[in-house]
Structure formats: C-alpha cells, structure tokens
C-alpha cells in the first residue's frame, strides 16, 4: 500500500514539473514575440525616417537643379555685340553646366552647390543690367548720329543752294537785268496791347520779323509789278513758314520755301519797301539769316540776333 501511495506522489510531481515547464515555455514565447514586435516597430520607424530624409534631400536637389537650369536659360537669352562680355558669359555658362553635372551625380554638397548657384545668378543679373545700359547708350548714340547726319544734310543743301544762287546771280548781273537793294535792315518786333509794333531782341517776346530795304535804280529791267520774296532762316537751318499753305517759289533753278512776300510797283526809280513775317510761332535764340529774292535771284541778305 505504501508503494502505491509513493507511486501516486511521484506521478503528481512529474505532472507538476510538466505544467511548470509548459508555463515557462509559454512565457518565453510571449516575451520573444513582444521583443520581436518592438524590434519590428522600431525598424519601421527608422525606415520611415530614412524615407523622409531621402525625400527632403531629393527636394533640395531638385530646387538647386531648377535654380541652375533657370540661370542657364537666362544666360542663353542674353544678346550682346560686346565680344568681351560674350566670352565672359560663355565661361559662366560652362561653370553652370559643370555644377549641374556634379549635383546630378549626387557626389557634391547641396549647400555648397546652392551657394554657388546664387552667386552665378547674381552675376547673370549684373550682365542683364550691363547689357541694358549698353543698349540705352547705343540708342542715344544712334539718335545723335541721325541728328548729326540731318544737320550735315541741311548744311550741304544750304551750301549747294548758295552755290547755285551765286552762279545765277552772276549771270543776271552780266545781263544787267537784276535789281539791286541797298540799306537793308531786319529784326524782330513785338506787338503791344495798343497794337503798336516795337523792336525787340528777345526771342520770347518776338512775334514778327520785319525786313526793310531800298530798291536801287535800274534802267535795264522792265518796269511794272515786282514780287519780292523773303526767306528767314532760323538758327537750326529751317526756313520760317508763311501763314498760308502754299509757300514754294523758284530761285536759281531750284524750288524752295519762303517766309513772306510782297508785290511792289517798280518804275525804274529808287523805291523803299518792307516785308513782314507773321508766322505766329515761338522763335528761338540765335542768329537769323534774312534773304530777299526777286525774279528768281537773291538781291540782298542780312542777319539779326535774338537772345
């Protein structure tokens, strides 16, 4: 009987040990799963952080590349005839292309690349300002040259006209048919409120131009009505226009403008006459040339100054 009791105790102890071992195994499995789950979550978080860093790096990379490519496009759009500036801009473009290649390779510091890109862009903006200044200077020079060419053309035309007039006048003198004027005077007038005309040497107050002269005795020319034309040439070489639209006449074989005209009845005797210009435009300062023509030839000339 004692043996039976001992066998029962031994079986119970074995069962207890078996249950304890099984419980221990379950606990170990639970701990192992918890550790593996924690490691998996930590790895997942680390992977997410790594992906975020890679995304940020990619964004910065694209920003720097975009800045460089826009700067390169701006250089390509710049146009200049300055050879030195062209060479300098080509060197800058080469630097940009080399920097783009470095950034794309991923072996270059993005911070350093961004700093260099900003420097290259600032240099490009400076070129834009220089080219704009050169273009403005060229436009001003072109306008100045055009003005000079026009002035030379006016001067040449005046010289040619004077040469033609001189030849014609000499021919008329040889025939003895040209009229002569003496005591010619010219000047500007202003009109007072009461209508009185008074002399003035001020451009701002000048409203009229008067030219008075004496026609000398000439028994060779035919007596009768004679038309005298007055040309008032301003300091800039222009003929002051007459008030009516048709102010063209022929002289010395050419056609030109006159400022005013007057008809007088000439009877081969000395005759005093005056011609008035009332163009109504503001006069400028300088020397004015007054020429008087009759019969297609210049018969007299004088000058006056306005200040």
Image: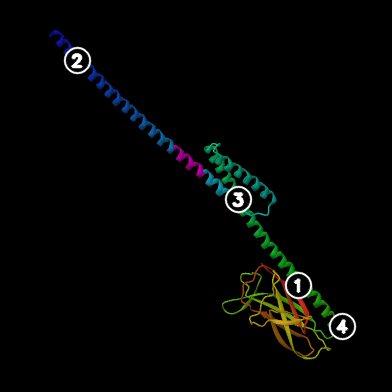
- Furthest-right residue in this view: 174
> At 32% across and 28% down in the image, what residue appears?
33
N-term mark: 1 or 2: 2
The residues colored magenta run 52-63
> Which disc, if any, is residue 11?
2
Within 10 Å of disc 1 (Cα), the crowding (few <14, some 14-19, many 20+) is: few
Out of 1 and 129, give the one closest to the viewer: 1
| SS at circle 2 | helix
Describe the element under mark 1 as helix, strand or loop.
Answer: helix
Residue 285 rendering spot, x and y as whole percentages:
66, 67
Image: 178 above or below 237: below
Query: Label 3 belongs to which residue?
Result: 75
Earlier in the chain: of badge 4 and badge 3, it is 3
Nearer-the-camera pick, 158 or 240: 158
Mark 1 to mark 2 CA distance (whole Å): 143 Å
Q: CA distance from mark 3 to mark 1?
A: 48 Å
């Amino acid at each position: 009987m004692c043996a039976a009791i001992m066998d029962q105790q031994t079986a119970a102890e074995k069962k207890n040990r078996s249950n304890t071992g099984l419980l221990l195994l379950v606990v170990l499995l639970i701990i192992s799963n918890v550790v593996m789950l924690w490691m998996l979550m930590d790895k997942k978080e680390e992977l997410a952080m790594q992906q975020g860093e890679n995304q940020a790096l990619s964004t910065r990379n694209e920003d720097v590349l975009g800045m460089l490519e826009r700067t390169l496009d701006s250089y390509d759009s710049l146009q200049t005839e300055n050879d030195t500036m062209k060479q300098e801009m080509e060197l800058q473009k080469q630097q940009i292309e080399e920097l783009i290649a470095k950034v794309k390779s991923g072996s270059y510091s993005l911070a350093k690349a961004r700093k260099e890109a900003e420097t290259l862009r600032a240099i490009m903006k400076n070129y834009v300002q220089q080219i704009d200044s050169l273009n403005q200077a060229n436009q001003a020079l072109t306008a100045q040259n055009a003005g000079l060419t026009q002035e030379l053309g006016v001067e040449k035309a005046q010289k040619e006209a004077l040469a033609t007039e001189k030849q014609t006048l000499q021919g008329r003198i040889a025939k003895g048919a040209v009229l002569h004027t003496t005591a010619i005077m010219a000047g500007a007038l202003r009109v007072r409120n009461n209508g009185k005309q008074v002399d003035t040497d001020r451009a701002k107050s000048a409203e009229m131009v008067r030219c008075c002269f004496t026609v000398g005795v000439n028994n060779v020319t035919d007596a009768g009505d004679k038309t005298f034309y007055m040309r008032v040439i301003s300091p800039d070489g222009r003929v002051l226009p007459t008030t009516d639209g048709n102010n063209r006449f022929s002289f010395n074989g050419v056609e030109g403008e006159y400022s005013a005209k007057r008809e007088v009845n000439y009877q081969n005797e000395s005759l005093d006459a005056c011609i008035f210009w009332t163009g109504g435009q503001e006069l400028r300062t300088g020397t004015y040339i007054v020429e008087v023509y009759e019969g297609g030839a210049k018969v007299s000339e004088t000058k006056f100054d306005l200040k």
